[in-house]
Image (cartoon, rainbow, N blue to C red):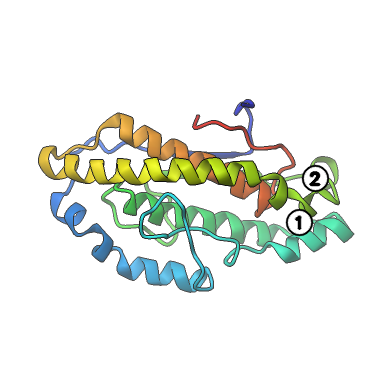
């Protein structure tokens, strides 16, 4: 299954301790429309996040993928501002995804971290990244796509269950919260490996 210790892509989301907002929870897909438009524009109109029933989040269309691949292949360089763009787009998309998945009531910020703590370590390209591996990382990650697709169905069920739980109790069950966050964490590691190209370490099959 692989170890998550020291993996260069990490994600934690603070569990909300205050009673949840039932009104915004009930209308969450509609309340999120303005921020979804902004995310779609930043992502070239091709944003997709498997964990959300509304297909929102991060796809390679908004990331600097092909230019980064070519720079690593021919120059063994990863321009820092390209990395910073990819990192901050991932952070923004994750905040939007967390809001849609009912993990937080705070409206997603375009720049502030809020309750979503996502980090990807900037690589030392010459020492840590192979020149040719970025050409096949997307292919090597196929087993993860398959597992994440099945887990995405479970996440969808968890989001629906959480919606009812928040409406009736004002709380989201911690087990559902942890499972959804674990899925997003797994997905982030795959994105960091196959598309952001920040590491050559194969993503572990783990929600931890």
Does 197 appear above or below 42?
A: above
Does 91 appear above or below 205?
A: below
* Labelled pair 2, 1 in contact (Cβ < 8 Å): yes
The answer to whether any part of residue 118 appears in the image is no
Q: Residue at x 54, y 73 (%)?
A: 44
Residue 13 image offset from top left, x and y in percent: 40, 40
Front position in the image: 117 or 55: 55
Residue 172 image offset from top left, x and y in percent: 24, 37
Q: Is residue 156 left or right of residue 4?
A: left
Q: Residues within 10 Å of mark 1 (few under 14, many from 20)?
A: many
Front position in the image: 60 or 84: 60
Q: Residue at x 72, y 37 (%)?
A: 201
Foreground: disc 2 or disc 1 = 2
- Please tell me how many numbered marks the rendered image carries: 2
Displayed quadrant of residue 129: top right
Residue 165 image offset from top left, x and y in percent: 18, 39
Tell me the CA gap for discs 2 and 1: 10 Å
The answer to whether any part of residue 8 appears in the image is yes
Quadrant the N terminus occupies:
top right
Does 46 appear above or below 179?
A: below
| Tag shown at residue 78 | 1
Check disc 2 and report the residue beneath it.
129
């Amino acid at each position: 299954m692989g170890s998550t210790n020291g993996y260069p892509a990490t994600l934690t989301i603070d569990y909300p301790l205050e009673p949840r907002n039932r009104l915004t929870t009930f209308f969450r897909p509609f309340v999120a429309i303005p921020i979804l438009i902004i995310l779609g524009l930043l992502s070239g109109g091709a944003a997709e996040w498997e964990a959300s029933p509304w297909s929102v989040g991060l796809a390679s269309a908004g990331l600097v993928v092909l230019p980064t691949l070519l720079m690593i292949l021919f120059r063994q360089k990863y321009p820092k501002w390209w990395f910073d763009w990819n990192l901050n787009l991932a952070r923004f998309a994750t905040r939007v995804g967390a809001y849609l998945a009912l993990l937080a009531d705070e409206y997603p910020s375009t720049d502030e971290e809020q309750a979503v703590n996502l980090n990807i370590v900037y690589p030392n390209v010459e020492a840590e990244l192979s020149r040719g591996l970025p050409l096949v990382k997307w292919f090597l990650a196929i087993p993860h796509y398959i597992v994440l697709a099945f887990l995405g169905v479970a996440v969808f069920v968890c989001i629906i269950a959480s919606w009812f739980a928040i409406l009736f109790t004002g709380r989201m069950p911690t087990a559902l919260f942890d499972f959804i966050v674990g899925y997003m964490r797994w997905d982030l590691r795959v994105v960091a490996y196959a598309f952001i190209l920040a590491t050559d370490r194969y993503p572990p099959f783990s929600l931890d």
